[in-house]
Amino acid sequence: ISGSAIAQTAPTEFPAQLPHRQGLSMEMPNVGEDTQLQAAIAAPTRPEADKARDVYRHPMETLTFWGLQHGQTIVEIEPGRAGWWRNILEPYAAATGGTYVGVSRPLDGMGVEDGTADIVVVARAFHNWSRDGRVGPYLQAFYKALKPGGVLAVEQHRSGEGVAVETVAPTGYVPESWVIRMAREAGFELDARSDLNANSADDHDHPFGVWTLPPIRRSEQDGRTLTAEERAAFDAIGESDRMTLRFRKPLTA
């Protein structure tokens, strides 16, 4: 999908502008001295391919921004076979007296008792869920699993604003304002936004969607093959432009 095609698609279900920040912080997090988290990120058992991506995914800063702490019950949604976040969160939970739970089918169960999770982590999934109506039901399941004051932590490929979700989701991107609106409709409060995983070099317009970029680096599809020059140009962009959001379940929920 070309950038020009996206620009001509009028949004139908959400505002073109992000909600007013109302004092929400866009600052980089203060990275504390959590030696267990540092150890989990640097662990020799963590795959080298995972560590090579730290420059793009900023695990220490991102987890600090989300408010990860010792002894928490951490639920990760659809961690996948590679388990990039799982390879940090599971040993961290074990080392700090916490619990890690990976959930592949949220509507079949969240793996924890209702109202007991401290943090639910969702990474790069909203574009998939938007295409078959799972966003609302999944968010409701996350809300139910979290304790009052618990955190919904979101990392997601970010499109430009003012575009329709159904147009850009097949490319792997969705608008930040749409994710915020959907979470608010499920009862969450937006606690903070950060641009620590932003990438201004990503114009969101790639032949094979976000999967053109690292780490997937798709170079051929439907008879279209990237030239060596194109491949090098997309590699130079790095990983996608991403929103990083922290929502909370209200204390009075």
Image: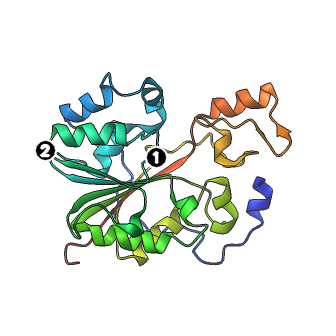
Quarter-of-image position of residue 171? bottom right
The residue type indicated by label 1 comes to Gly
The residue type indicated by label 2 comes to Gly
Residue 117 lies, in percent from the top left, at: 23, 61
**Of the pair 29 and 87, the residue shown nearer to us:** 87
In this rendering, the answer to whether 43 lies above or below 215 is above
Residue 80's disc number: 1
Distance between the alpha carbons at the discs numbered 2 and 1: 24 Å
Quarter-of-image position of residue 249? bottom left
In this rendering, the answer to whether 215 lies above or below 206 is above
At mark 1, the secondary structure is loop
Quarter-of-image position of residue 169? bottom right
Report the residue at 28% width, 67% height from top: 145
Closer to viewer: mark 2 or mark 1: 1
Of the 4 image quadrants, the one containing the C terminus is: bottom left
Residue 97's disc number: 2
Residue 189, can we see it?
Answer: no
Report the residue at 57% width, 43% height from top: 240
Q: Residue furthest right?
A: 223
